[in-house]
């Protein structure tokens, strides 16, 4: 019984216990409980945080190589099953979109990997755990760690958990509208679309361009943008939308 209102001292976790608890919480977010947690620790080890000899072999660099290929394999299978009518070109574009650096970095943020990355003092102070390239590398390394620990089915489960919604709702157009319009015109025996500047307005530091796109025997379409290139893409998109042409597979 406490005397004079004294409180029992709070029980504090040791650094090792705290680290283990943090990794257990990370495993929960990833969706895989590691049989060999050292694999996860290696996947989180940046070369700057490795002391002693052979730092490249004791960092995540080899795992990133493996994870890149495992990720590509799983996503390719997902795309093949999800889009049975898609041709090779479309599947390739979708794959590139899903495994690009930006997408992998977003997955790393969803997993909240940043705070767990093992960095050297200089890299840590510089905020390297927030760098897109490092986050993307670690996301791929974690996929490799899961693959090595639980095999292909385990890696497939993690990839599907974090990449499925990106596969179903890509965040950027899969094809440049100017390319789609040129292919559409070529398939109909028409010459390449002609883009012409209609007007330029605004100050020199913030101009606005209006561009028209022309094809023989068809009504021109106009759109504007902050640059000629942006205005051309907008005009091509407007033309395709008017003609009912999709930009994911071209028709």
Image: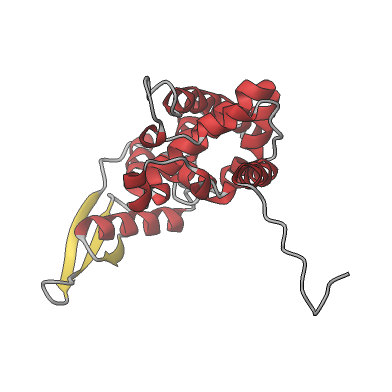
Q: Look at the image and tell me whether residue 229 can be seen.
A: yes
Residue at the location (34% across, 54% down)? 236
Q: Nearer the viewer, residue 250 or 115?
A: 115
Q: What percent of the width, then of the height, locates residue 11?
A: 72, 57
Outermost residue to the front: 3
41 horizontally vs 62: left or right: right
12 horizontally vs 235: left or right: right
User: Total of numbered circles in the picture?
Assistant: 0
70 horizontally vs 1: left or right: left
Q: What percent of the width, then of the height, locates residue 222?
A: 30, 64
Vertical relation: 227 (above or below) 178:
below
Residue at the location (59% across, 46% down)? 15
Q: Look at the image and tell me whether residue 250 can be seen.
A: no
The image quarter in which residue 179 lies: top left
Q: Give the quadrant of the N terminus.
A: bottom right
Residue at the location (49% across, 22% down)? 66
Outermost residue to the left: 204
């Amino acid at each position: 019984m406490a005397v004079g209102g004294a409180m029992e001292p709070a029980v504090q976790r040791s650094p090792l216990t705290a680290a283990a608890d943090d990794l257990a919480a990370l495993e929960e977010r990833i969706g895989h409980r590691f049989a060999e947690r050292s694999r996860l620790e290696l996947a989180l080890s940046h070369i700057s945080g490795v002391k002693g000899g052979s730092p490249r072999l004791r960092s995540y660099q080899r795992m990133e190589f493996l994870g890149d290929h495992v990720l590509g394999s799983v996503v390719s299978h997902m795309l093949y099953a999800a889009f049975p009518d898609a041709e090779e070109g479309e599947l390739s574009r979708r794959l590139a979109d899903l495994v690009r650096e930006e997408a992998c970095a977003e997955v790393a943020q969803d997993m909240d990997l940043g705070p767990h990355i093992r960095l050297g003092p200089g890299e840590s102070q510089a905020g390297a755990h927030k760098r897109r390239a490092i986050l993307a590398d670690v996301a791929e390394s974690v996929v490799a760690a899961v693959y090595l620990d639980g095999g292909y089915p385990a890696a497939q489960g993690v990839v599907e958990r974090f990449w499925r919604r990106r596969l179903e709702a890509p965040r950027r157009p899969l094809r440049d509208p100017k390319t789609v319009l040129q292919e559409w015109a070529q398939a109909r025996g028409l010459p390449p679309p002609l883009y012409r500047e209609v007007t330029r307005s605004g100050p020199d530091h913030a101009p606005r361009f209006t561009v028209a796109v022309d094809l023989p025997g068809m009504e021109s379409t106009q759109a504007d943008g902050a640059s000629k290139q942006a205005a051309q893409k907008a005009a091509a998109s407007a033309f395709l939308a008017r003609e009912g042409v999709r930009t994911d597979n071209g028709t």
